[in-house]
Amino acid sequence: MTWKRFGYICRKASVEYKDQEKISRCLSRIESEKSCDLYGGKIRIDSWPRKILDDIGNIQDKQKAQDTIEIYKGLNFANQFELPMRFKRVTGYLAFVIFFFCILVGIYQLKVAPSFLEVFENFKISIPSNLLFYQEYWKHVVFAVSVMLVFSFVIGFKMKKLFMFTVGVENSFIVKFLVFRSVRESYQRVIEIIQFPIFFFSGAKKQIDDPVVSHLQSISSSKMCISKEMQELIEIEMQSILESCEKQMKLMSAVVAMVVVVAIFFFLVSAYSPLSILGDIL
């Protein structure tokens, strides 16, 4: 909803911008109107929509500021920047794995294992090695699985932050070192694309050898619609981000699932061994 509000502000500013009014004042006035709330809640101060609006307000040349708004009003960010349902399903799968594993371990440790130990103690039978092994190392297994699950959720949370377009999230340790390189590169290109009108009209220095910037500059000097081309490039990069994020989340889910399956296997082995011995006795 943040980008819908951003788009509305730009569209209305393009028709209500007055010659004697500062662009920052115009944007602030539109954003404070009650009608603006119909397009979503207030824009977070640490988000890219907020930063772009602030940067537009800092452009001193009125004509350049108006040209910048004209570009942004022609863009439709809302659909591209929403967190997809497919990504949420993978996160939900991880949550289900956590819940199932915790329930299974809890039942076994609180109900099953103590009963086995009590029976063997009453019959004065040596405890099976499989049960002893599990009882000795189950905390380590739970700890390892928990660390992997927390690790996966932290990465998933940071990926969600990418779709929320929080300023600076791309510089966090997790995104820089633990997220797929393809995700980082595509996200950086999206940021360069949505910032291009600001750099172009504000006169800020930007590396010409950057392929995205170079391409958009060539479009700006032609008769092509810059808004249309920015829209197309954003759609391509956001699709790449989505596919790469899903690939990483599925990989982490598969690894976690394998570890959980191995843990359940040891649980079944440790449970079957006492049952077999008790069956022979009875």
Image (cartoon, grey):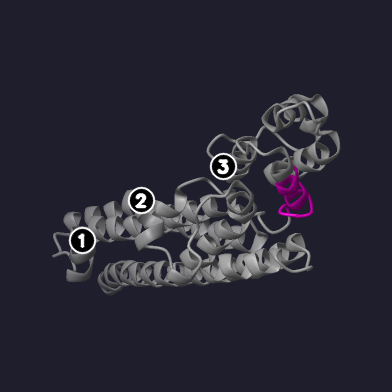
Q: Amino acid at mark 3?
A: Ser
The main secondary structure of the magenta stretch is: helix
Q: Position of residue 144 (x, y in %)?
A: 29, 60
Residue 30: image quadrant is top right
- Reading the image, the residue beneath label 2 is 111
Q: Residue at x 80, y 31 (%)?
A: 19
- Quarter in which the N terminus is drawn: top right
Task: Choose mark 2 or mark 3, whichever is in front.
Answer: 3
Write down the quadrant of residue 234 in the picture. Answer: bottom right
> Mark 3 and mark 2 in contact (Cβ < 8 Å)?
no
Q: Is there any visible trace of residue 119 in the rendered image?
A: no
Mark 3 near mark 1, Cβ–Cβ under 8 Å?
no
Mark 1, mark 2: which one is toward the viewer? 1
Left or right: residue 111 versus residue 18 is: left
Q: Secondary structure at mark 1?
A: helix
Graded by Cα atoms within 10 Å as few (under 14), some (14 to 19) or many (20 or more), the crowding at tag 1 reads few
Q: Nearer the viewer, mark 3 or mark 1?
A: 3
**Residue stretch in magenta:** 66-78
Residue, disc 3: 47
Question: In the image, is residue 61 above or below residue 90?
Answer: above
Q: CA distance from mark 3 to mark 1?
A: 45 Å
* Residue picked out by circle 1: 137
Q: Earlier in the sequence, mark 1 or mark 2?
A: 2
Mark 3 is surrounded, within 10 Å at the Cα level, by few (under 14), some (14 to 19) or many (20 or more) other residues, namely some
Q: Residue at x 25, y 70 (%)?
A: 281
User: Is residue 152 among what the camera can see?
Assistant: yes
| Secondary structure category for the residue under label 2 | helix
- SS class of the residue under badge 3? loop
Residue 277 as seen in the image, left or right of residue 260: left
Label 1 is placed on what type of residue?
Tyr
